[in-house]
Image (cartoon, grey):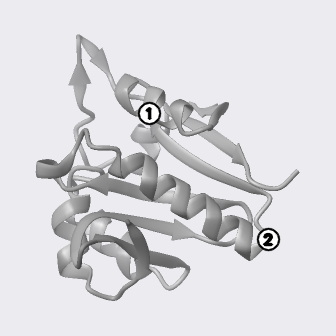
Amino acid sequence: MLSLRETEEIEQLAAILRDALPYEDRLRAELSDPLVTPYAAVLDSEIVGAAAIRWDAPSEMTLLAVDAKRRGRGYGKAIVAAIVEEARARGVGRLLVSTASFSVDNILFYQKCGFRMSHVLRDYFATAFPEKQPPVWGGITLRDMLVLDYQVLD
């Protein structure tokens, strides 16, 4: 059974989370932020995924990734379910997650986990990463961030 453990093993988490946030300086800053709790998703004493949660209001899952060799086996959904349970135990009413507006696979994944579309942060990537060249996918330049939410408590 998969378990979620708070950890300070940033190196192990960073290796997995680079897929979620490929900018090393931003990734390290997020994982070392005192307001963010880093988690290792562990199965049979092996780390199969990682997440980072900002538990303030509103609470937000800022990073989530499954080890590349283990994708497609339901670990991502199990990690999200464990995070939702932790949010419930903490009395969190609403949990947010953000993803690039053209990350169709991520959008579908979070909806399958029970998240609903909340709002769009227009021009997020131009303002949040002014020093980086925005990625282009299918001829579309990444500009906007889509925010989804999960109603943990009614």
Q: Is residue 16 left or right of residue 37?
A: left
Instruction: Please give left or right for residue 115 compared with residue 33 in the image.
Output: right
Residue 49: x %, y % from top left: 29, 62
The answer to whether any part of residue 148 appears in the image is yes
Residue receiving disc 1: 109
Q: Amino acid at mark 2?
A: Gly
Q: What residue is rendered at 27% in x and 43% in y?
A: 73
Location of residue 57 by image quarter: bottom right
On the question of residue 129 being in view, the answer is: no
Q: Residue furthest top?
A: 139
Label 2's element? loop
Badge 2: residue crowd in 10 Å (few <14, some 14–19, many ≥20): few
Please report the residue visible at 41 percent of the width from the left and 40 percent of the height from the top: 125
Relative height, residue 135 to residue 7 (above, below): above
- Disc on res. 18: none
Q: Residues within 10 Å of mark 1 (few under 14, many from 20)?
A: some
Task: Identify which residue, 33 or 4, lies in the foreground.
Answer: 4
What percent of the width, then of the height, locates residue 19? 22, 50
Among the two numbered marks 2 and 1 on one chain, the one whose residue lies closer to the N terminus: 2
- Against 149, is 79 above or below? below
Q: Nearer the viewer, residue 34 or 87?
A: 87
Residue flagged by tag 1: what amino acid is it? Phe
Q: Which residue is mark 2?
A: 91
Asked if 26 appears above or below 97 in the picture, the reply is: below
Q: Nearer the viewer, residue 50 or 79?
A: 79
Q: Quadrant of the N terminus?
A: bottom left
Q: Quadrant of residue 115?
A: top right
The residue at the far left in this view is: 69
Picture residue at 40% right of the left edge, 58% below the top: 63
